[in-house]
Image (spheres, rainbow, N blue to C red):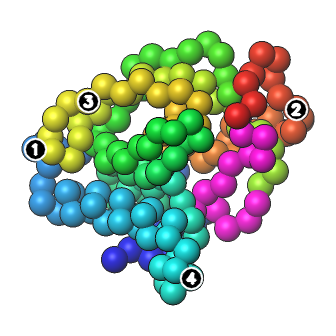
Amino acid sequence: MLTMKDIIRDGHPTLREKAQEVPLPLSEEDRNTLLAMREFLINSQDEELANKYGLRSGVGLAAPQINLSKRMIAVYLPDDGEGKSYDLMLVNPKIMSHSVQEAYLPTGEGCLSVDEDIPGLVHRKNRITVKATDIDGKEVKLRLKGYPAIVVQHEIDHINGVMFYDHIDAQHPLQPKVDAVEL
């Protein structure tokens, strides 16, 4: 079972590397890693288990965050605020297209690998289409909008060596972009 001790923190070089493509078909080891990443997210959202094991709540996790430079992400979002849930384990995900319109969370973003709060708005694409391979080796194409799109972009950033705060405007960190949607 993954715990917070398995999550590497900001400043670790793996978080700034472009992760390696994962060979397919998925090895048993990579499959088990993805399942463990998903389990961490589920456990972190369970108040009792989170307290018992000292887990910080998270909705997404990328393999580089557990010091594994591989292009794998997990997202567990039981309710996106619009009645939809997302339980994703994606291998070699790529954003194929995106909207011009951007969106942001008014409270900013957080990260399991970043212990302190970093104030600032993170502008991301409001809609994205992602192509990936799922844990069963099937190619999937996902169209995401709003919060789920933000979560997946945050995790894809991790496999590209990008941290959320890299997107914050240093001059005007709390200034929304014109036409950006507040979620």
Residue type indicated by callout 4? Asn
Residue annotated with mark 4: 51
Image quadrant of residue 159?
Answer: top left
Identify the mark at residue 175; answer none if there is no mark. 2
| Circles 1, 4 touching at the beta carbon (< 8 Å) | no
Q: Is residue 21 above or below residue 176?
A: below
Mark 2 crowdedness (10 Å alpha carbons): few <14, some 14-19, many ≥20: few
Q: Is residue 126 above or below residue 25?
A: above
- Which residue appears at 14% of the width and 40% of the height? 137
Between the C-alphas of marks 1 and 3, the distance is 15 Å
Q: Secondary structure at mark 3?
A: strand
Q: Given this view, does label 1 or label 3 mark the residue nearer the observer?
A: 3
Q: Give the residue furthest to the front.
A: 83
Q: Which badge, 4 or 3, comes first in the chain's sequence?
A: 4
Residue type indicated by callout 3? Val
- Which residue appears at 60% of the width and 47% of the height? 163
Residue type indicated by callout 1? Pro
Residue annotated with mark 1: 25
Q: Which badge, 2 or 1, comes first in the chain's sequence?
A: 1
Residue annotated with mark 3: 140
**Residue 177 located left or right of residue 138:** right
